[in-house]
Image (cartoon, coloured by chain):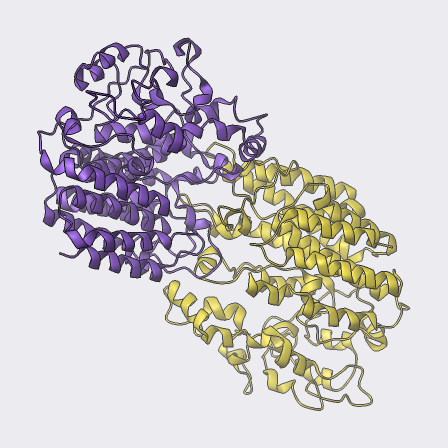
Chain colours: A purple, B yellow
Amino acid sequence: MLRAIAIRAARVVAAAAGLTLVLGAVTVGHAQTSRPENTHLGVASCSGNNCHGATERPPQSRVPGNEYIIWSKRDKHRLAYAVLLEDRAIKMARALGLPDAANQQICLTCHADDVPANLRGPQFQLSDGVGCEACHGGASGWLGSHIARAPHAQNVANGMYPTDQPAARAEKCLGCHFGDETRFLDHRIYGAGHPRLRFELDTFTAIQPAHFVVDKSYVERKGLITDLQVWGAGQAISLIKHMDAILDPRRTRGGIFPDFVVFDCQSCHHDYGPVAKPTTTGLPPGTIKLYDANLVMMRVAASQVAPAAARSLSEHMVALHRASNTDWAQVQSEARAVRAVAESLVTPLAQHQYTREDMHALADAVIAVGLQPDDWQVSHAEQVTMSLEAIVSNMRSAGYIGEGQDGPITTAMNAVYATFASEATVRPDAFAKALHDVQRAIGR
Amino acid sequence: MSRWRGVFGRGAIAPMLLVLAAAIPATAQQQPAPPPQPAQDTVHLGVRSCAGNNCHGAVQPLKTSHIEQNEYLIWSQKDKHSKAFAVLREERGLRIAHNLGLQDAEHAKICLDCHADDVAPNRRGPSFQISDGVGCEACHGGAGGGGPEAPQGWLGTHISGTNHAADIAAGMYPTDRPIERAERCIRCHIGDDKRFANHDIMGAGHPPMPFELDTFTAIQPAHFVVDKDYVERKGRPNDMQFWAVGQAVDLRERMDKILDKNNVPKGANPELALFDCQACHHAMNQLQWQKRPAIGLGPGKLRLYDATAVMLRTIASRVAPDAAKDLGDHLVALHRATVEPNGDYWAGVQREATAIREAADKLVPALAKHNFDKGDAKALAQAVIALSTGGEDLDYSSAQQQTMALESIVAAMKAFGFADEGQLKGLDDALGKVYEAAADDQKYRPDTFVQALKDFESKLP
């Protein structure tokens, strides 16, 4: 994570200059234009040194041209397939009763661009892992217009996936980074040894690391999309997907327990030390608690953008937790209500323009979540940290962070991450101290 | 986990084994136990009425005494039962109470139920003090009499030095008998129809409660010595028998907990204390799941605690093979029922729990009668070891029970001379390594444990 922060800082500094110059019109929509029928031509069709595999920016290019290089050298998506061949994956596969991992649909569905055989072009290689077209969509329909430098909207109309749009990006990423009705990392897979997924759209875009630079050309073509718009859409869609999991009978019914992935991991996976009574949920100690970190963050986001929605989320959150101790049908009915509120917030959050004051207020509200001694959760702390990262990033690119502030903020944020060196040893007091330092560094 | 080690440590056990080993050779046969008549409503006179220096608080025993007379001293100095009330006032006790929404712990019935001899006020004699914790009469029964079953109480009979049977007849609780001792200990160490350290209490900060009757008798530490007098008065206790009966009573009680209407799942939260602690409570970077072909649950499933069921089945396969098969079949069905993807899963769980309860209940008297001999000692030790070395059950909870089972078997080997001194030394040393491998649930590694068991097995006579 520390390394990721450094990468992010570098990106932000590089981007800031270009960003502040142009405040073009913003068009953000909940676009859904993926064309699964397009053939996936394979990474080789994008990686030419005159296209996205350039070591130097090609003349007249609107983009740096090194997107393939960044992906192939630094982005873990490229290794997604390769890890299936490693020892850990083979052990996991055995635990699941499978002969291997690299030939299993259940693994390939997220560890590769696993389109049907008839949609694989001649240069397509499954072993490329999560390659270009896994996110940008099969290129057979749009590669022509793309090479011909058609406007972005034209490419999207031809089937390129609009990863620049916050909501669409959230849908795409969370399809694997949480799951949907077709792909789902259930607790069986975790129990077999899969590492835990944690996600926040804006931070994960940055630490991927992003292979785009938001400069003048970018803003002209795609509009100014802010970190906080990406963050807000990511939280809303994350929440929707968590509620979908509670509502999907195939994903939640398995005997006594619903699938454990709908619960907070540390609610069970902790040492036997006494835990504080979770006052905000109203549940007695010793109760398995539904995962609610996105819900808590959404409430924070909504309290700025749509106060009525925030109140509604608060009420349903309490009811959702209470119901988890009494009646699963009631849990589902509360989940439906939460989902509806989240759905109504996707577009407002993806389009909201945050003022300087908004950003400070948001930072304070996010920090307050991390300081709650009676309801301190590792999952909350994670979302607090990544949300702060998004806020700070947005403040930087908007020019709200003064000359001498950059260093102290980075130092303070790194200290926050350091309290996460190990999930088992993270302590609320150290985290709280680090948060106070961030608050001081951000200033007013 | 360090708080575990205090209970589950060799330090406390080794001296007790020496005491047991020093016992005279077996001459008396195990006496058939007369039916128990534990008195229910006698007056509790308090620890003071037992602790006199000419009674159970003596530094030197009287010449005519058939016991050590230091029983009170052992209890008050070494036995954690004497601290049971005091811990309620400590920081942890207060925090648990706070987490449960209680004012404090020392006045809460839910705590006093097991942390003191919490009899009704009208049954507390003038010297009775609740702060004595789990005192003499919490286990041995109220000494003051009063109820129709024991109108005079047993203290008079006891002091007059008649015999044990007369004390029992007068209302003393027969802790010397395996079934009765198991029932008495387990009513707190697991629970009964009124008492249960459920997961609310655990979640509030109560430490986990592993239990095995024979080992816990030894590490208490026991305040009795099995010498010639003891054997003449009460028969020679067989550690394997206490272990086996303890498992059966333990399992019966656990099944009762599944059948308890208070523990029916509500919402997404069944009573989590019915489940195996380490199935959830492990670090996420430390994988715990072990394939258990006999139960067939995949990874990522929360399984009911079944270490005593597996152990009882192992014992039964030597002593009562039909019951073993019955237990094995129903245990598989019980686990399957927990993941049955239809609305009736709990009915299935209860059906299987009822069948297991019945099997355990039948085994209680059978095991209390069985004469565990040298052949049993070896065969049972091998069967216990095979649970891990054969890859059938490598869960931590099972490793705990396997370790304590071997402890009991070795203790019986010593007491009955089933092994010579050199062999016993080898077994003792090997057992030390087994304990080490199972001492800490967060550091438990199946392969280390299996290796320690194999070394132990190679030392069996």
Decide if residue B195 is on the left or right side of residue B449. Answer: left
Nearer to me, A98 or A12: A12
Residue B341 in the image, given as x and y percentages of width and height: 48, 32
Decide if residue B268 is on the left or right side of residue B431. Answer: left
Nearer to me, B223 or B404: B404
Q: What is the quadrant of the C terminus of chain B in the image?
A: bottom right
Residue A326 appears in the figure: no
Q: In the current view of this chain or complex, which residue is farthest to the right?
A: B27
Residue B313 in the image, given as x and y percentages of width and height: 71, 46
Place residue A87 in its image quadrant: top right
Decide if residue B23 is on the left or right side of residue A282. Answer: right
Is residue A318 depicted above or below B418 in this figure? Answer: above
Decide if residue A162 is on the left or right side of residue B93. Answer: left
Residue in view at x 44 percent, y 37 percent = A259
Residue in view at x 54 percent, y 78 percent = B123
Is residue B379 depicted above or below A126 in this figure? Answer: below
Q: What is the quadrant of the N terminus of chain B in the image?
A: bottom right
Residue B284 appears in the figure: yes
Is residue B97 depicted above or below A195 in this figure? Answer: below
Residue B165 in the image, given as x and y percentages of width and height: 77, 74
Residue B94 in the image, given as x and y percentages of width and height: 42, 71
How many numbered discs, if any?
A: 0
Nearer to me, B425 or B411: B425
Place residue A297 in its image quadrant: top left
Residue in view at x 32 percent, y 40 percent = A330
